[in-house]
Image (cartoon, grey):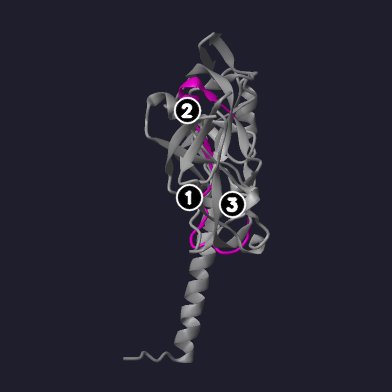
Amino acid sequence: MRIHLSSSQRIFLICLASAALFWFLAKLSDSYAVDMPLSIEFENLPRGLYIDSENQVQIPARIRAEGYRLVIFNWLKRPHIAMDARRAFKRDKTMYCWSPAWDKKAIADLAYHYEVLSLYEDSLIYPIVETDREHLPIRLPKPIEFAEGYDSVGGLQLSPDSVWVTAPDAILDTLKAIQTAPYRLRNVRRDIAATLAVVNPDPARVRMDVQTVKLSLKVSRFAAGDFSLPVANDSLGPGKKIKFFPARVKLHFSLPLGDYGKLRAADFKVVADTADLSKATPYLPLKLIAAPPGVRNVHITPEQVEYLIVEE
């Protein structure tokens, strides 16, 4: 069912809406006295000290301000008091005590936006915590997932790859690395370059000298390759020689498609780990001790060989 309005009815509704809007704007320009907590922001703290304000970061107050400012305070950012540690009274080595009676400048700075009628706390006391500084690596929150047949060339590059973190010892002891913001790295098949934010694990108590990092990842399609290689025959000393069975093994690997055809068997070297000779074992494990850069997913078949020590 549609409602049809005449021209006079439409004009009436427009006038009514306009009057309501002008009335609302007029009310916003009026001043109002309200109770509102003021946030505390600390400034000019001595190096190596941290104020433990976790339990009290606001002070209840009664303020007067225009209606539109109160709307902004409620929806965007609440008013705050800048507590300057140079003006705060240091009670002893473990406490800071701040009082509006001592810090007239902090209260005067508030008058530009609103009038402070009263503060419901005559002083604030904060414990002082010593901080330390530690160099921590920067890590992605999740591993990279490559598309099938693809891998990185040279690995993931973060610049910078570490950050200086300043925090109380109790927090530093729990941190092993600092993570970046989440970044989707799934089914990756092409180069990636991005700038990521570094996530502060506790903004109220942790300070970091790095806020963003540059991520660089070169990606290539990889191809499978293999070579038949001899097991290196190392001498055991004068008059002794060791022989392996089998004498040759198969080396399987993958490498960037652009490098396929450039490799030679002589670029690799497989040896038997003779450290296990003292254990009287009939087998020795094999290991790869030389390979060109960029070679991935190396696998030797078989993984161990039998041996025979021969007197020369």
Position of residue 128 measured from the top left corner of the image (x, y, whole percent):
51, 16
Position of residue 309 measured from the top left corner of the image (x, y, whole percent):
47, 31
Q: Work out which residue is located at the far front of the displayed protein and give it.
A: 312
Tell me the element at label 3: loop
Tell me the element at label 2: helix
Residue that mark 3 sits on: 295
- Start-end of magenta stretch: 165-194
At x 48%, y 90%, the residue is 7
At x 58%, y 19%, the residue is 49
Q: Which of label 1 and label 3 is nearer to you?
A: 1
Q: Is residue 124 left or right of residue 133?
A: left
Point out the tag, 2 or 1, that comes first from the N-terminus. Answer: 2
Residue 275, disc: 2
Residue 176 within the magenta-colored segment of the rendering: yes
Position of residue 252 measured from the top left corner of the image (x, y, whole percent):
51, 54
Quarter of the image that includes the C terminus? top right
Query: Which residue is nearer to you in this view: 32 or 84?
Result: 84
Please report contact status of discs 1 and 3: CB closer than 8 Å, yes or no.
no
Q: Is residue 227 above or below residue 34?
A: below
